[in-house]
Image (cartoon, rainbow, N blue to C red):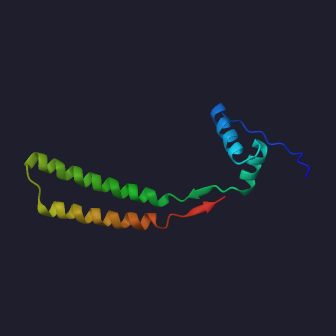
Amino acid sequence: MNRDNFIKIRVTADEMSVIKKRAENAGMNVSKFIRTLVLNGKIILYDTENIYRFNQLMRSVGTNINQIAAVANSEKSVYKNDIDSLRREIEKISADFKSCISPLKSNEI
């Protein structure tokens, strides 16, 4: 096969060292290693939109915890209803987290 097209990439000295080491471990020269990896390898991209929703939920819990701590520090007591409400919210977030993470999609390139 006549390979008459040329691709040039820039890498750091450390990156080049890693590439050479991996090529050597694969029993290939650098050119063949990179060509094989590019033609047969995969890059997996994850849809992380659900992670954003989880972060929002965690911020809301943090806000509630801070509010309860402020009340406890100023009044030296906390109402059972506040603790129960926080517990329910944490349970909901735990369930939401599981539902957000489970459909995490990946796209192979």
Q: Is residue 93 left or right of residue 45?
A: left
Residue drawn at x 22%, y 61% as measured from the top left? 86
Q: Would you place residue 76 above or below residue 20 in this image? A: below
Residue drawn at x 42%, y 68% as measured from the top left? 99
Residue drawn at x 64%, y 55% as measured from the top left? 43
Q: In the rendered picture of this protein, how many numbered marks are placed on residues? A: 0
Residue 90 occupies quadrant: bottom left
Placement of the C terminus among the 4 image quadrants? bottom right
In front of the other: 103 or 68: 103
Q: Is residue 98 left or right of residue 30?
A: left
x, y percent for residue 65: 23, 53
In front of the other: 87 or 1: 1
x, y percent for residue 31: 78, 44
Q: Is residue 51 left or right of residue 82?
A: right
x, y percent for residue 95: 35, 67
Residue drawn at x 14%, y 64% as measured from the top left? 81
| Residue farthest to the top, as pictured | 13
x, y percent for residue 84: 18, 64
| Residue farthest to the right, as pictured | 2
In front of the other: 94 or 4: 4
